[in-house]
Image: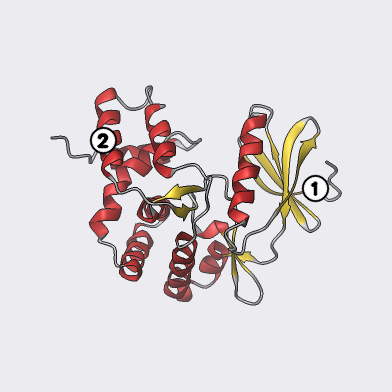
Amino acid sequence: MNLTEKKILITRPHKIVYKDGDRIVKVFSKGHGKANVFNEALCHTRVEESGLDIPKVLEVSTFEDQWAIAIEYVEGKTLAQLMEENPDKIEQYINQFVDLQIKMSSCKVNRLTFQKDKFSRKINSLKDTIDATARYELCTRLNSMPVHTKLCHGDFNPTNVIVKEDGSMAIVDWSHATQGNASGDAAITYQEFALKNPDLADYYLDVFCKKTDTAKQYVQKWLPITAAARLTQIITDEEKQFLMRWIDVIDFQ
């Protein structure tokens, strides 16, 4: 894979994202295995079948001996940028954000990983972080949740929504996509908001629950599960402490 522009957009511990003309290229670190790269590309490609407005995967190849994925570039600003630039329109943006989330969860994409399976694997991998009793309680709670097959993004937040010049919205970064329960996906979104702005998180949850006719307590029941799953990612000490507080609120019986 050749890059003609190499303008860095994002730098993460396991990848660098470049803008290269009319595409973006994710170049992964050498520690990020080949299977993980192809799995992400396959996951994204399957979501393309949903008919949602998302950029298409163009190529999986190598760049300077590291695996890379090329994806269409979507022109526009992230919803997060617009929220920062126009704080007076926050409520409008959150309502549009939730409408888009509902549209997404109305889709079904066969052959995606099941959300419950992914959460279970993540929880059971936390032997050095969470003791056996807490892991058991988390898995018991997870197993009690209804099984759905809705399209779930896994990291649905305003930085992953691109607003085009005509006002339409595209959803990007499908590396965590699963089929599962929309309220579990909403719990992930709520926690991402809560880490930075608890008031905005509460407003988001109010809007989501009202528009979907979902009991707030039901989404909240997912929070210890989604907090534990996020602990498996590369996070700051501050975020780890924040997530551990959610896990600590499990009711032991």
Q: Is residue 200 left or right of residue 43?
A: left
Q: CA distance from mark 2 to mark 1?
A: 47 Å
Mark before the other along the chain sequence, 2 or 1? 1
User: What residue do we see at 43% from left, 72% from top?
Assistant: 95
Residue 161: percent from the left, percent from the top?
56, 61
User: What residue do we see at 38% from left, 51% from top?
Assistant: 148
Q: Is residue 178 left or right of residue 140?
A: right
Q: Is residue 104 left or right of residue 147?
A: right
Residue 203 in the image: above or below residue 67: below
Q: Is residue 231 visible?
A: yes
Secondary structure state at the residue bearing disc 2: helix
Q: Indicate which disc residue 140 carries.
A: 2
Q: Is residue 194 visible?
A: no
Q: Is residue 4 left or right of residue 110?
A: right
State the residue in front, 71 or 39. 39
Secondary structure state at the residue bearing disc 1: loop
Residue 103: percent from the left, percent from the top?
48, 66
Residue 229: percent from the left, percent from the top?
41, 38
User: What residue do we see at 53% from left, 62% from top?
Assistant: 80
Residue type at mark 2 is Thr
Residue type at mark 1 is Lys
